[in-house]
């Protein structure tokens, strides 16, 4: 089964195109590293920017993208993909558009990090796995690859040892641990340097240990030549 991938020659136009983008951190013209933030169901770009304040790092540019109606796709991320279209394609295109804008502003993709929570984590991991290359980092908090079935043969290419962090509860009401484990396997298959943390009884949230992992990853990306 072939998966939708963004085509630079024929951009996808859907519900999440031309939505608000909220920026934070240092000005993009002064930044060497950027992070794209992708919110969860019912949340907002602004809420993700507030979440980024937790990282306590000054020399990074943030931009948070907004889903139309605060929801990237209508059903569970484990529903058949066609039931969540055009939301998934439109969300993937929205991420790609921000990477392109950052590239044009002088920030290479290997200095761009993607971070998502919940629905945003599902889109983040799905985008990276469908468009493997060297990113600054990929962070999926309480999420995993999208679809009722995951075919490892659908994911081709190399992440070139991009650091990937997956964090989730062992009893998340929305995200089965088995899907996080499978997401880890796919990223290993395509050459990511992956760290997975499963937290006992955490629920559908983010904890301080995850925030520390993200901070460390940002610092690593900033310091890499």
Image: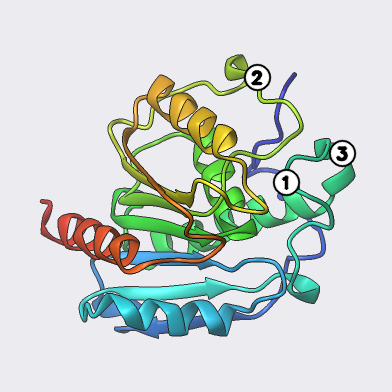
* Left or right of 195 on screen, residue 127: right
Q: CA distance from mark 1 to mark 2?
A: 15 Å
Q: Nearer the viewer, mark 1 or mark 2?
A: 1
Q: Which residue is mark 2?
A: 151
State the mark number for residue 126: none
Sort mark 3 into few (<14), some (14-19) or many (20+) by Cα contacts within 10 Å. Answer: few
Judging from the image, what secondary structure is the residue with disc 1 in? loop
Labelled disc at residue 82: 3
Residue 166 locus on image (x, y percent)? 41, 46
Q: Earlier in the sequence, mark 1 or mark 2?
A: 1
Residue 133 drawn at (x, y percent): 40, 36
Residue 160: % across, % down: 30, 30
Task: Please name the residue shown 12% across and 52% down the image.
Answer: 224
Q: Residues within 10 Å of mark 2 (few under 14, many from 20)?
A: few
User: CA separation, marks 2 and 3?
Assistant: 15 Å
Image quadrant where residue 155 sits = top right
- Residue farthest toward the front in the current orientation of the protein: 201
CB under 8 Å between callouts 1 and 2? Answer: no
Q: Which numbered disc flags the more N-terminal residue, 3 or 1?
A: 1
Q: Residue at x 84, y 58 (%)?
A: 74
Describe the element under mark 3 as helix, strand or loop. Answer: helix
Observer-nearest of 164 and 208: 208
Sequence-first tag of 2 and 3? 3
Which secondary structure, mark 2? loop
Residue 77, label in figure: 1
Q: Nearer the viewer, mark 3 or mark 1?
A: 1
Q: Is residue 12 above or below residue 185?
A: below
Residue closest to the far right:
83
Mark 1 Cα-neighbour bin, 10 Å: few <14, some 14–19, many ≥20: many
Where residue 24 sits in the image (x, y, percent)?
Answer: 40, 84
Q: Which residue is at 54% across, 60% downward?
A: 203
């Amino acid at each position: 089964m072939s998966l939708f991938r963004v085509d630079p020659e024929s951009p996808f136009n859907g519900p999440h195109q031309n939505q608000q983008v909220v920026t934070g951190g240092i000005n993009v013209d002064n930044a060497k590293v950027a992070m794209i933030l992708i919110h969860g169901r019912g949340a907002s770009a602004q809420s993700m920017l507030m979440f980024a304040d937790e990282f306590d790092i000054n020399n990074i540019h943030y931009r948070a993208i907004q889903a139309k109606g605060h929801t990237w796709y209508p059903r569970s991320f484990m529903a058949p993909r066609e039931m969540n279209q055009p939301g998934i394609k439109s969300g993937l295109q929205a991420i790609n558009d921000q990477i392109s804008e950052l590239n044009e502003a002088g920030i290479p993709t290997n200095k761009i990090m993607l971070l998502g929570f919940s629905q945003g984590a599902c889109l983040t991991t799905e985008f990276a796995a469908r468009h493997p290359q060297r990113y600054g980092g990929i962070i999926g908090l309480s999420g995993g690859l999208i679809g009722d079935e995951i075919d490892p043969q659908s994911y081709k290419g190399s992440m070139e040892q991009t650091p990937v962090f997956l964090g989730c509860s062992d009893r998340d009401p929305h995200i089965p641990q088995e899907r996080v484990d499978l997401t880890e396997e796919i990223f290993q298959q395509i050459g990511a340097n992956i760290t997975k943390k499963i937290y006992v009884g955490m629920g559908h949230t983010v904890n301080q240990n995850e925030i520390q992992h993200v901070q460390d990853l940002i610092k690593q990306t900033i310091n890499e030549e």
